Image (cartoon, rainbow, N blue to C red):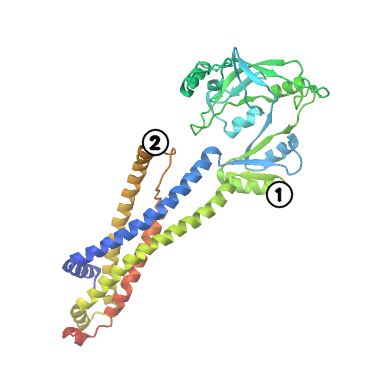
Amino acid sequence: MRFKDKHRFVRSNMKKNKTRVWMTILASTIGCAFLIMLASVGFAVHKSAIDNVMEFRMVNEITVNKENGEMNEKDVKKLEKIGKVKAVTRKKSAPVDRVTIGDYQIMTNVMSAHMPSEKKAGFELAKGRMPASKNEVVVGYQFAQELSKTPPKDFANGLSEEEAQKKLKELSYKGDILNKTLTYHLKGKDSETQSNTPEKTLEVKVVGIGKKPVKEWISDNSVFITDDLYNEVISLVGEDGSGTNPAKEVKTYDEVKVYTATAEDVKAVTDKIEKMDYQTYSIIKELKEMNVYFTLFKAGLILIGAIAVLIASIGIFNTMTMAVTERSQDIGIMKAIGATPKTIKRIFLLESGYIGLWGVGLGTLLAYIVSYSVNFAFPIIVEQFMHEKAPEGFMLSYIPWSLTVIAVTICMGVTLLSGWRPAAKATTVDVLKALRRDV
């Protein structure tokens, strides 16, 4: 019996019981859609968590520390010799009291950075260029915004909080900071008397402004200076700001990071670094642990969703059982003209497969429609009823192609299993009894 004939036979029989067949398809559709939608919540949470981590750290970044002792230039040279290492950045905190430009000032974190390695690692600027000489610096994106004049005493008396904030904004620096000259104020302490030593100053030029942070609530007002300028600062006030041993050149680093050529190289490079008795941290390690927990979470949701598919399979089993009972005479005729049990079984499995395909197709389409609708409506609902904005990029539902494949496989598998028993029963129908309608 050709497939075309089987298809025609199944189609004509399904048309005879349209209502029952479509109700079964509806149950399969709801079961499939429920499975995908439930699991999509887990996939959305997983994706949001990973995106959040990825936005804050580079995938090919490895932070390196020593268990005993501080990182120094010798350690950096060893790390640079490892294969597949693109760059090794190193930073030191500078003992700067405050930074000013005219009447405006800011208390900020000043770090020395090895500019060639920073550029090699992918440090990006919003505008300007990297420092080329000792007294040139790069500042964070929000540096200029946080420069302000010192407010007078009791300036907020009699003002509401909103008015006070507005007045503070009026004291903020206006204009572009690029190519402007800043003054570093260096204040040390005498190590014996603990009294303040005379304030020293250094003038530097802003030649670059860092890239805007990925999140709106992150504020980057840091300052990156060259190693040569850092050594000059240390020569003036000492490593700890005490004024002692002012000529000492600091050769240890507060922060050392290794950058690999690609994300795929991180694991291999990390293993090599750890064999050299260093401690490491990378986003790959964090994601590995995170993925284990989220995989278990998603598997649990898929398992719960599969229960709905199993419930829908009861309807398919019932439909196919009734189909076998009602078509016993047709089965008898097919057997009488030479149809094998294998052919009869395939006909009924084909019918249950058609029901499953309709259910899976419509269920998947419904799930995608509901998913997009929920993601579109959720921020609006949060804003209307909670009077707050939903987190940027937040998704309540996310359906990757892998979830669709898993759901389709589960639903079609359950559908065929549900039709297997009735199909097997169809092969046992007695020809003589079937022709006499004595079922």
Using the rendered image of the protein, determine whether residue 417 is visible from the camera's viewpoint: yes
Quadrant in the picture for residue 328: bottom left
The reply to whether discs 1 and 2 touch (Cβ–Cβ < 8 Å) is no
Please tell me whether residue 170 is drawn above or below residue 436 in the rendered image: above
Choose between 26 and 211: the one closer to the eye.
26
Residue 399, x across and y down, in percent: 39, 50
Q: Residue at x 46, y 59 (%)?
A: 300
Q: Which residue is mark 2?
A: 387
Q: Amino acid at mark 1?
A: Lys
Q: Looking at the rendered structure, which numbered label has been put on residue 275?
A: 1
Eye-nearest disc, 1 or 2? 2
Quadrant in the picture for residue 305: bottom left
Q: Amino acid at mark 2?
A: His
Residue 372, x across and y down, in percent: 34, 45
Q: Looking at the rendered structure, which numbered label has been put on residue 53?
A: none
N-terminal-most mark, 1 or 2: 1
Using the rendered image of the protein, determine whether residue 245 is visible from the camera's viewpoint: no
Please tell me whether residue 164 is drawn above or below residue 426 in the rendered image: above
Quadrant housing the N terminus: bottom left
Local packing at callout 1 (Cα closer than 10 Å; few below 14, some 14-19, many 20+) is: few
Left or right of residue 113, residue 45 in this image: left
Quadrant in the picture for residue 193: top right
Residue 242, x across and y down, in percent: 77, 24
